Image: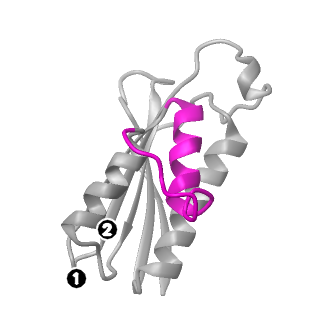
Amino acid sequence: MRLQVRVDAGTLRFKTDARALHRLLSNLLVNAIKHSQASLVVLRAAPLDATKPGAGVQFIVVDDGVGLDEQVQQSLNRVLSGQRDLSPQYDRAGFGIVARLARDLGAGVVLESEPDDGTTVTVIVPSVVGPSPALGGLSVD
């Protein structure tokens, strides 16, 4: 299994809760490595709008693994969008943690997958403007 990290050209300057973002991305990467049977997992980071520094960042985790069927994909997207809670047995597992952290960051998360064609999870993290007590003073610059 190979892991690649790609950062698109341009400066990725934005303010957010660095610990929460690290935990969110770590959960996505661990999930892809552990459960997808992938030979390649890629984490890509790109500015949301290259013409507006500090606008935020999108992180994309792609694997070439077994993928998910439509029913599982729809169920996870409902969890990730906050439309549905996970059952208690999965609440503290990967996607439950990702959903909670995304809400805390004000981020959007979308999962796309096809059986036998891998999975792509896109996380859009807006930049926080000004100090926020919820961030504990952390930033990613």
Q: Mark on residue 116?
A: 1
Q: Mark on residue 119?
A: 2
Instruction: Residue 95: say if magenta.
Output: yes
Classify mark 1: helix, strand or loop: loop
> Where does the image place residue 17, in percent across and percent down from the top left?
67, 34
> Where does the image place residue 87, in percent across and percent down from the top left?
50, 58
Within-10-Å neighbours for mark 1: few <14, some 14–19, many 20+: few
Q: Residue furthest front?
A: 88
Q: Is residue 50 visible?
A: yes
- Pick the front one: 131 or 36: 36
Residue type at mark 1: give it: Asp
Instruction: Residue 97: say if magenta.
Output: yes
Q: Residue at x 70, y 31 (%)?
A: 139
Classify mark 2: helix, strand or loop: strand
Q: Residue at x 53, y 67 (%)?
A: 29
Q: Is residue 102 positioned above or below 86 on the image?
A: above
Residue type at mark 2: give it: Thr
Question: Disc 1 to disc 2, how far (Cα)?
Answer: 9 Å
